[in-house]
Image (cartoon, rainbow, N blue to C red):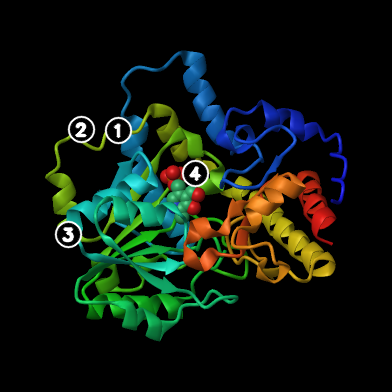
């Protein structure tokens, strides 16, 4: 077997290995992690300052101001970033994105109902649908381009399909769906009276010249049947702080949420709320720099792989910091990530976790320093060339 290249003595490795998060603790220290969607870059400094201020004041008493300010801050951020002006009165704060998805499915669909997923897709989507007793309706995207197959979408819907759970921008493929594709989905949703749950957590990481089109901005019908879920956690690197929002355009869901016992869904902790508020009120310049850096990472990785390992099929992401690698031609079986973990000591996300159409694929997280990314690619190339 090929020997692994020596790990360069990178200064950032000491900081990364000191972190308590799952990314750097799940595997042994000889493994370079590029799996879970956390960034190795330090989080948005404005959010760090906001949390530090709380800590320095010892300000851990009951506090509702930041949470109460989030709907307005999110609405303003959306208007200024994506030209969509949601009504802050229809925005509700959640502890995380999947909590809002669970609530929407439980309140607006019935056991046995079908929920469409555009696959391969973010693994917890399968679990949230199945754990509430709904059925996954699989609608695969076109392999390679990961575009929407409109006829397939129309054809998979049965008479018990009541919702579609979108991920736009799309994890793991990095697609930012076009207005045309979203219009086609909106047409299907209207014809079949579907609830649209649009997970737009990656919306602030779309690379120019692409744009993010909020689903609820497509028109009146779309706005009235959509719940848009989001968080500052991906773009500003705050996932451990647990804070998300949902714009509930669907009136029946708003009523359903309003009727729940006050404490059933819990409340966000102050650190999560102040950090998200700092991001959506002062994070634009930092975000632009981060996006430019991540754009460079995707180009660099795609060029290196095309040059040195052309057997891997790479779709350059239009959004996200995720690279979806088609490794089917390499003969590594259904789960190339497992093979790479064993032989290259790099941890990618296993393709099959993203559904049956992820077999033979792996997902690589690009959000690290250029040197760590190069060390990861050196290891992959070292065992595969
Ligand atoms: C599409 C998508 N939705 C939701 C999440 C998780 O959201 P949260 O930070 O609220 O846990 C992720 C995390 O990677 C994601 O990719």
Q: Is residue 192 rendered to the left or right of residue 151?
A: left
View extreme (bottom): residue: 151
The residue located at (33%, 83%) in the rendering is 155
Q: Which residue is mark 3?
A: 110
- The reply to whether the residue tagged 4 has its Cβ within 8 angstroms of ligand 1 is yes
Res 267 label: 1
Q: CA distance from mark 3 to mark 1?
A: 26 Å
The circle drawn on residue 263 is 2
- The quarter of the rendered structure image containing the C terminus is bottom right
Residue in front for this viewpoint, 107 or 56: 107
Residue bearing mark 4: 233
Q: Nearer the viewer, mark 4 or mark 3?
A: 3
Q: CA distance from mark 4 to mark 2?
A: 23 Å
Of the two numbered discs 3 and 2 in the rendering, the one whose residue sits closer to the viewer? 3
Residues at circles 3 and 1 in contact by the CB criterion of under 8 Å: no
4 and 3 marks in contact (CB < 8 Å)? no
The answer to whether the residues at label 4 and label 2 have Cβ atoms under 8 Å apart is no
């Amino acid at each position: 077997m090929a020997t692994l290249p020596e790990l360069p003595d990178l200064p950032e490795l000491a900081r990364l290995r000191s972190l308590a998060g799952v990314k750097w603790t799940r595997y042994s220290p000889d493994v370079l992690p590029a799996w879970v969607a956390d960034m190795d870059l330090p989080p948005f400094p404005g959010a760090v300052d906001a949390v530090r201020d709380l800590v320095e004041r010892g300000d851990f008493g009951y506090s509702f101001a930041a949470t109460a300010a989030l709907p307005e801050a999110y609405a303003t951020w959306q208007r200024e970033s994506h030209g969509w002006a949601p009504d802050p009165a229809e925005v509700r704060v959640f502890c995380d994105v999947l909590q809002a998805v669970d609530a929407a499915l439980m309140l607006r669909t019935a056991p046995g109902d079908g929920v469409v997923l555009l696959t391969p897709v973010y693994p917890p989507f399968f679990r949230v649908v199945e754990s509430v007793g709904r059925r996954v309706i699989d609608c695969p995207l076109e392999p390679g381009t990961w575009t929407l197959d409109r006829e397939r979408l129309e054809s998979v819907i049965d008479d018990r399909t009541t919702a579609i759970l979108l991920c736009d921008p799309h994890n793991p493929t990095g697609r930012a769906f076009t207005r045309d594709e979203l219009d086609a989905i909106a047409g299907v949703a209207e014809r079949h009276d579907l609830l649209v749950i649009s997970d737009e957590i990656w919306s602030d990481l779309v690379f120019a010249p692409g744009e993010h089109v909020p689903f609820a901005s497509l028109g009146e019908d779309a706005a009235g049947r959509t719940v848009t879920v989001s968080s500052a956690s991906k773009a500003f690197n705050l996932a451990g702080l647990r804070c998300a929002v949902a714009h509930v355009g669907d009136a029946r869901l708003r009523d359903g949420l309003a009727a729940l016992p006050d404490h059933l869904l819990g409340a966000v902790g102050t650190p999560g709320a102040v950090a998200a508020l700092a991001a959506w009120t002062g994070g634009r310049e930092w975000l632009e720099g981060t996006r430019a850096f991540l754009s460079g990472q995707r180009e660099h990785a795609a060029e290196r792989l095309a040059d040195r390992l052309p057997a891997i099929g790479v779709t350059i992401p239009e959004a996200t910091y995720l690279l979806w690698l088609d490794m089917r031609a390499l003969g590594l079986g259904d789960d190339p990530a497992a093979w790479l973990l064993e032989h290259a000591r790099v941890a990618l996300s296993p393709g099959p976790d993203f559904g049956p159409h992820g077999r033979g694929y792996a997902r690589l997280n690009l959000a690290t320093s250029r040197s760590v990314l190069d060390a990861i690619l050196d290891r992959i190339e070292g065992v595969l060339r």
